Image (cartoon, grey):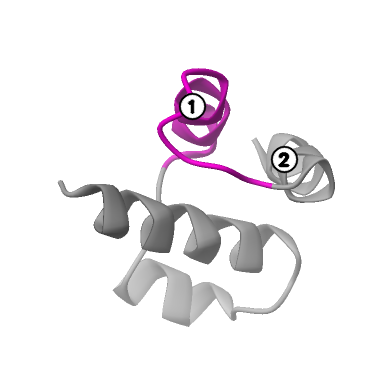
Amino acid sequence: MTSKALHQAARRTAAYAGGELRREDWEQMPGLEPVWCGILNALGLITLAQADLARIEAVR
């Protein structure tokens, strides 16, 4: 997966966690598993706002 694809998938996960995507849309084209968002962000491979990370953690 390219860096750009990782960022897009992470943003999709953040959108789902924030209630911006319906469950059906998420299931059709999911983003990253929530645990990966935290790991990849900590490694500096993606960048997510703290608010997005908190929302993602809450759905985990």
Are circles 2 and 1 on residues that touch, CB within 8 Å? no
Helix, strand or loop at label 1? It is loop
Magenta region includes residue 41:
yes
Q: Type of residue at label 1? A: Gly
Q: Give the range drawn in magenta.
A: 33-48
Q: Closer to the observer: label 2 or label 1?
A: 1
Question: Mark 2 = which residue?
Answer: 53
- Measuring from the top left, give residue 7's x and y in whole percent: 41, 54
Q: Quadrant of residue 50?
A: top right
Give neighbour class at mark 1: few <14, some 14-19, many 20+ (Cα, 10 Å): few
Name the quarter where the C terminus is drawn.
top right
Residue 26 shown left or right of residue 6 in the figure: right
Q: Type of residue at label 2? A: Leu
Q: Residue drawn at (74%, 50%), measured in percent from left and top?
A: 52
Q: Residue drawn at (17%, 49%), measured in percent from left and top?
A: 2
Give neighbour class at mark 2: few <14, some 14-19, many 20+ (Cα, 10 Å): many
- Residue in front for this viewpoint, 23 or 9: 9
Helix, strand or loop at label 2? It is helix
Decide if residue 31 is in sight here: no
- Measuring from the top left, give residue 36's x and y in whole percent: 44, 30
Tell me the number on the disc at residue 44.
Answer: 1
Residue 41 shown left or right of residue 52 in the figure: left
Nearer-N-terminus badge (2/1): 1
Q: Is residue 48 above or below residue 4?
A: above
Residue 2 shown left or right of residue 50 in the figure: left
- Measuring from the top left, give residue 32's x and y in whole percent: 40, 47
Measured in 3D between alpha carbons, the distance from the residue under mark 2 to the one under mark 1, in whole angstroms, is: 13 Å
Q: Residue drawn at (39%, 63%), measured in percent from left and top?
A: 8
Magenta region includes residue 4:
no
Q: In which quarter of the image is residue 56?
A: top right
Q: Is residue 20 above or below residue 55?
A: below
